[in-house]
Image (cartoon, rainbow, N blue to C red):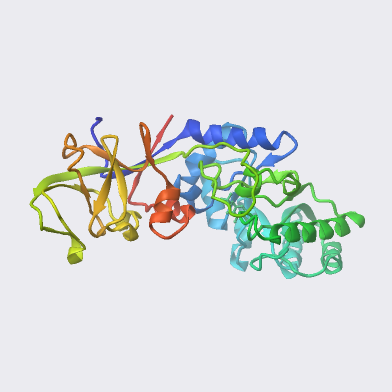
């Protein structure tokens, strides 16, 4: 086993990242622009390195949530277009301009303010407009007539994209996605009828891409989790997924100590676990301070020497105990896999999410900055 150089770290495979991106490009075809979503530090895979890698692989657009995330990519030298999806505050408008970030506009008043910016700086500024077609979060709910009237007052702006976001794309047992799509199309048609035809129309995140809901693809798609190798489970009568991707991230920790405990010994905070037989206890360099969920107390599983072993007792802030009785060859200094694959066994973010009562996105996004990142081929 290679020597560990970090207490706990993630290994991120560049080749898998690129393979996932290419698989999405191949599925949607050359008419559809793939805009990888690298918000939340690329779901904790590292937005700068992920964007660099995908830019080299041909990505021409990235989506982030905030102006700050966009600025960080620019400062790292990313030259592709960057769409800021989760709105911005008035004080961030200057930075949008300075760092050449493309905003999504969610209110007609903000459209007018963006027009005033364009006039003040004598530049044509582009934007994407988001419709709230039924998600009930960000986006414009006004009728098409009001949107048209507002657009007509913006001669200095380039209306580059029209978008929406689905609330229940993974729920094939409700008609919400069809309803949202119908609403989107109706508004898009009314805008087109008076000459507002943005270059891009985009609605789909991972699930409608992966499950082949082609009518939602428009000519741009916004995959997040699929880029990182995950596709959320769906419910209801869904077709078979068309997309095959593989997890990009492997999370490891090191065994600090190994000790023998007799039967009837308590383990960890609150004595949440008592040994029922002589137990070979391993203490790992990871805890909830690293983002390893506290909810995995007495429930988690890690891979040690190619075998699944259980977490014993409470996950503490910096340390976690596991049962190494059936992995006798594991010694202090060895690495174990918290999330990932060793040979034929794997623990993935879906499994951890289920065991800890959350969603896979949350598992990935919780990996803290204390966890070192290593990029591998
Ligand atoms: C996060 C996000 C995405 C990507 O979602 P995935 O399910 O991870 O593919 C796409 N569009 C918007 C608006 C988002 O907020």
- Residue 120 appears in view: no
Q: Position of residue 291 (x, y in %)?
A: 35, 55
Q: Nearer the viewer, residue 165 or 138?
A: 165
Left or right, 322 with respect to 246, comes to left
Q: Quadrant of the N terminus?
A: top left
Q: Nearer the viewer, residue 5 or 232?
A: 232
Q: Nearer the viewer, residue 130 or 211?
A: 211
Residue lying at the far left of the rendered structure: 262
Q: Position of residue 293 (x, y in %)?
A: 35, 57
Q: Position of residue 275 (x, y in %)?
A: 15, 55
Left or right, 257 with respect to 51, comes to left
Q: Is residue 96 above or below residue 110?
A: above
Q: Is residue 111 above or below residue 260?
A: below
Identify the image quadrant of residue 130: bottom right
- Residue 237 appears in view: yes
Residue found 56% across the figure and 47% down from its top: 224
Q: Is residue 342 above or below residue 363?
A: above
Q: Position of residue 94 (x, y in %)?
A: 62, 60
Q: Quadrant of the C terminus?
A: top left
Left or right, 280 with respect to 356, comes to left
Residue found 45% across the figure and 54% down from its top: 365
Identify the image quadrant of residue 128: bottom right
Q: Nearer the viewer, residue 305 or 274?
A: 274
Residue found 28% across the figure and 58% down from its top: 297
């Amino acid at each position: 086993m290679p020597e560990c150089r970090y207490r706990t770290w993630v290994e991120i495979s560049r080749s898998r990242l690129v393979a996932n991106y290419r698989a999405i490009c191949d599925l949607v075809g050359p008419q559809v622009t793939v805009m990888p979503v690298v918000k939340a530090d690329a779901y904790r895979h590292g937005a700068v390195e992920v964007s660099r890698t995908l830019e080299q692989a041909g990505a021409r657009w990235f989506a982030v949530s905030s102006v700050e995330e966009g600025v960080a990519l620019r400062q790292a030298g990313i030259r592709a277009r960057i769409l800021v999806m989760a709105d911005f505050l008035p004080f961030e408008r200057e930075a949008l301009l300075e760092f050449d970030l493309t905003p999504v506009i969610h209110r007609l008043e903000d459209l007018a303010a963006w027009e005033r910016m364009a006039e003040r700086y004598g530049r044509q500024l582009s934007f994407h407009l988001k419709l709230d077609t039924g998600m009930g979060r960000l986006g414009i709910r006004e009728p098409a007539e009001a949107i048209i009237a507002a657009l007509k007052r913006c001669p200095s702006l380039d209306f580059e994209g029209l978008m929406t976001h689905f609330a229940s794309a993974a729920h094939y047992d409700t008609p919400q996605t069809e309803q949202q799509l119908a609403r989107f199309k109706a508004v898009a048609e009314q805008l087109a009828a008076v000459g507002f035809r943005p270059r891009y129309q985009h609605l789909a995140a991972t699930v409608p891409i992966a499950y082949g809901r082609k009518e939602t693809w428009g000519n741009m798609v916004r995959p997040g989790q699929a880029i990182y190798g995950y596709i959320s489970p769906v419910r209801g009568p869904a077709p078979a997924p068309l997309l095959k991707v593989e997890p990009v991230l492997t999370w490891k920790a090191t065994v600090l100590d190994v000790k023998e405990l007799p039967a009837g010994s308590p383990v960890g905070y609150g004595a949440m676990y008592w040994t029922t037989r002589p137990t070979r206890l391993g203490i790992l360099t990871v805890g909830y301070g690293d983002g390893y969920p506290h909810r995995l107390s007495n429930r988690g599983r890690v891979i040690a020497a190619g075998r699944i072993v259980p977490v014993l007792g409470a996950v503490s802030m910096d340390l976690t105990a596991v049962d190494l009785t059936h992995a006798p060859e594991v010694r202090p200094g060895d690495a174990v896999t918290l999330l990932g694959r060793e040979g034929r066994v794997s623990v993935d973010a879906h499994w951890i999410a289920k065991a800890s009562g959350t969603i896979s996105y949350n598992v990935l996004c919780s990996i803290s900055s204390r966890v070192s990142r290593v990029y591998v081929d």
